């Protein structure tokens, strides 16, 4: 049977991060500072930085085309990418938006460079269809809709059912509404005139 010490040594694991730094030359002095800052997380290994050509990348979109250096850091103590990023920033003075850290356990995919060609917004472009597309929008659509509605006029269908005895056989015809000018006028006053002479 294994001892507790053997279980403990076997359960040790490392935490690996990929660090990308934009627009910065990582010389020996900078790497020493980074190593010292990683000692808080029990640094196991740090790889030699690899420089990539100047290009636009998804990690540093706001910076535009930049050169970047990439290296990996392995620690024995667990950490999250923002902690590693903050430690490197505090030790070297590199701005936070120039440092990108990815946990290789969860984010193992490399981001591809962003194309230099930026397309114009779609809203400002013309509709890609032909001229017939205009017939289904705007005033053209309103006119065609009104024509369709005009065709469907009918007086309703009579359906046979249980309540035929109490329902009207035909639909009532609509009469023109009478206005107050055509209605009989009641010009007679409800009050009787006072025939008693005044002063008596």
Image (tube, rainbow, N blue to C red):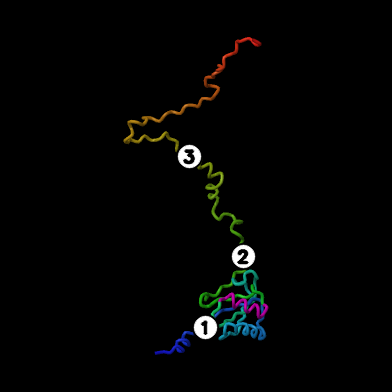
Marked residue nearer the N-terminal end (3 or 1)? 1
Asked whether 79 or 65 is in front, the reply is: 79
Q: What element carries label 1?
A: loop
Which residue is situated farthest in the front direction here?
Answer: 200
Query: Does the magenta-highlighted stretch encompass residue 171?
Result: no
Choose top left, top right, bottom left or bottom right for residue 45.
Answer: bottom right
Name the quadrant of the N terminus.
bottom left
Q: Is mark 2 on a helix, strand or loop?
A: loop
Give me the residue at 60% from left, 69% from top. 115
- Looking at the rendered structure, which numbered label has been put on residue 118? 2
Badge 1, how many Cα within 10 Å: few under 14, some, many 20+? some
Q: Is mark 3 on a helix, strand or loop?
A: helix
Badge 3, how many Cα within 10 Å: few under 14, some, many 20+? few
Residues drawn in magenta:
80-93
Give me the residue at 55% from left, 75% from top. 110
State the image coordinates of residue 6 (x, y, percent, origin top left).
45, 89
Name the quadrant of the C terminus.
top right
């Amino acid at each position: 049977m294994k001892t507790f010490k053997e279980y403990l040594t076997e359960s040790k694991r490392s935490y690996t991060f990929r660090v990308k730094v934009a627009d910065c030359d990582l010389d020996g002095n900078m790497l020493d500072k980074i190593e010292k800052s990683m000692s808080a997380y029990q640094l196991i290994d740090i790889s030699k930085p690899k420089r990539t050509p100047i290009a636009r990348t998804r990690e540093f979109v706001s910076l535009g085309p930049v050169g970047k250096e990439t290296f990996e850091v392995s620690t024995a103590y667990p950490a999250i990418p923002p902690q590693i990023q903050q430690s490197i920033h505090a030790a070297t003075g590199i701005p936070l938006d120039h440092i990108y850290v990815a946990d290789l356990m969860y984010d193992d995919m490399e981001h591809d460079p962003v194309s230099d060609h930026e397309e114009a917004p779609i809203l400002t472009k013309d509709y890609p269809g032909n001229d017939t597309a205009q017939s289904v929008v705007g005033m053209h659509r309103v006119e065609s809709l009104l024509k369709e509605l005009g065709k469907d006029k009918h007086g309703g269908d009579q359906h046979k059912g249980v309540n035929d005895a109490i329902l009207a056989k035909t639909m009532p015809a609509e009469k023109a509404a009478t206005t107050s000018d055509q209605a009989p006028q009641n010009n007679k006053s409800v009050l009787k005139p006072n025939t008693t002479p005044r002063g008596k």
